[in-house]
Image (tube, rainbow, N blue to C red):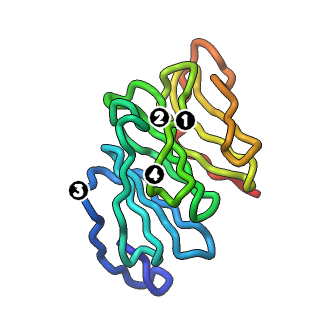
């Protein structure tokens, strides 16, 4: 559903394709651009504030073995990131686009096979993604997402399972 008139009324919309569970929606502030993501590597983007949507595809070569997309964030209408997990919830998945979601590139992850659930940026350069597991997973970037710290985990690093399903960066 697309919010209209400040939330006093709602307009039903139809998303393209056959989306399963939807896990995240993100609208770039002060623009018409938005993205919605979900299970089965579902991604759809809008350039008209949600009046119409275009389904995007993350190929299996870029999102190995399929899986679910749990979170999305765009730093501008071209550059964006999605995070998730492999089929069966066994392993992190992370992809990047530089053309508004038309194509995606896999960002390989090292370390524990923890699922990723959200990604957010504090500034155009500083961002973080978080996930679940033992040890819990997080990774940060200081260069706009070009590089991410590898195999980053958070204390307690052993013996405790900690799950982080969302993150909101405050500037």
Query: Tag on residue 57?
Result: none
- Which labelled disc corresponds to residue 103? 4
- Foreground tag (2 vs 4): 4
The picture quadrant where one finds residue 134 is top right
Disc number for residue 18: 3
Mark in front: 1 vs 4: 4
Residue 17 against residue 127 in the figure, above or below: below
Local packing at callout 2 (Cα closer than 10 Å; few below 14, some 14-19, many 20+) is: many
- Horizontally, residue 30 falls left or right of residue 118, namely right
Give the labeled residue for mark 1. Answer: 107
Left/right placement of residue 57 relative to residue 125 reads: left
Kindly state the secondary structure of the residue where label 2 is placed.
strand
Q: Nearer the viewer, residue 159 or 90?
A: 90
Q: Which mark is residue 93?
A: 2
Figure check: 41 above or below 159: below
Residue 89 rendering spot, x and y as whole percentages = 37, 29
Q: Nearer the viewer, mark 1 or mark 3?
A: 1
Q: Would you say the residues marked 1 and 2 are in contact, meaning their CB atoms lie under 8 Å apart?
A: no
User: Residue 30's spot in the image, x, y percent?
Assistant: 62, 75
Residue placed most toward the observer, 83 or 146: 146
Q: Residue at x 69, y 30 (%)?
A: 149
């Amino acid at each position: 559903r697309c919010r209209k008139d400040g939330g006093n009324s709602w307009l039903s919309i139809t998303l393209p394709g056959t989306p399963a569970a939807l896990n995240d929606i993100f609208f770039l502030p002060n623009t018409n651009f938005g993205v919605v993501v979900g299970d089965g590597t579902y991604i759809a983007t809008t350039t008209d504030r949600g009046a119409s949507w275009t389904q995007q595809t993350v190929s299996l070569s870029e999102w190995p073995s399929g899986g679910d997309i749990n979170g999305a964030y765009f730093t501008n209408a071209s550059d964006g990131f999605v995070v998730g997990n492999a089929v069966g919830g066994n392993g992190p998945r992370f992809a990047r686009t530089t053309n508004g979601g038309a194509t995606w590139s896999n960002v390989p992850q090292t370390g524990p096979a923890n699922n990723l659930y959200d990604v957010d940026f504090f500034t155009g350069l500083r961002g973080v993604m978080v996930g679940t597991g033992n040890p819990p997973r997080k990774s940060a970037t200081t260069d706009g997402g070009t590089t991410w710290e590898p195999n980053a985990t958070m204390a307690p690093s052993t013996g405790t399972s900690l799950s982080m399903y969302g993150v909101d960066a405050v500037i």
